[in-house]
Image (cartoon, rainbow, N blue to C red):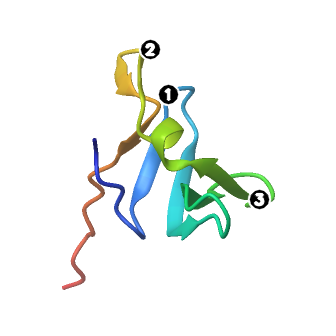
């Protein structure tokens, strides 16, 4: 299973980007959930079961539903 990176920026296979805020645990079932914020429009807050967040979908040249992005910072000189 893929490990989700808190504060990581992920691309959904449909093209939008999201910031993972935290991993939450359901109080009764102990199921893990990913808490993430849309980086577009109203910056809405979302939650999805961990297993669905990391599942393979193989769509639009992307293997997983959400894939961590390597975003490099530009250094100020």
Label 3, residues with CA under 10 Å away: few <14, some 14-19, many ≥20: few
Relative placement, left or right, of 12 versus 8 is: right
Q: From the viewer's perspective, is residue 44 above or below residue 64?
A: below
Residue 33: percent from left, percent from top = 56, 56
Number of numbered callouts drawn: 3
Mark closer to the chain start, 1 or 2 = 1
Rendered residue at 49%/27% (across/down): 13
- Which numbered tag is attached to residue 13? 1
Mark closer to the chain start, 2 or 3 = 3
Residue 2: percent from left, percent from top = 28, 45
Q: Which quadrant would residue 5 be assigned to in this image?
A: bottom left
* Most distant residue in the bottom direction: 77
Q: Which quadrant would residue 46 be assigned to in this image?
A: bottom right
Residue 62: percent from left, percent from top = 36, 22
Q: From the viewer's perspective, is residue 75 above or below residue 23?
A: below
Residue at image mark 3: 44
Q: Which quadrant would residue 30 be assigned to in this image?
A: bottom right
CA gap, disc 3 and disc 1? 18 Å
Task: Classify the position of the N terminus by image quarter.
Answer: top left
> SS of the residue at dot 1?
loop
- Which numbered tag is attached to residue 60? 2
């Amino acid at each position: 299973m893929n490990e989700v990176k808190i504060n990581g920026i992920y691309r959904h296979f449909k093209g939008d980007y999201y910031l993972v805020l935290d991993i939450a645990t359901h109080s009764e079932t102990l199921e893990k959930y990913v808490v993430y914020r849309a980086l577009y429009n109203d910056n809405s807050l979302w939650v999805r079961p961990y297993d669905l967040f990391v599942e393979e979908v193989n769509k639009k040249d992307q293997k997983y539903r959400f894939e961590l992005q390597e975003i490099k910072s530009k250094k100020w000189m």
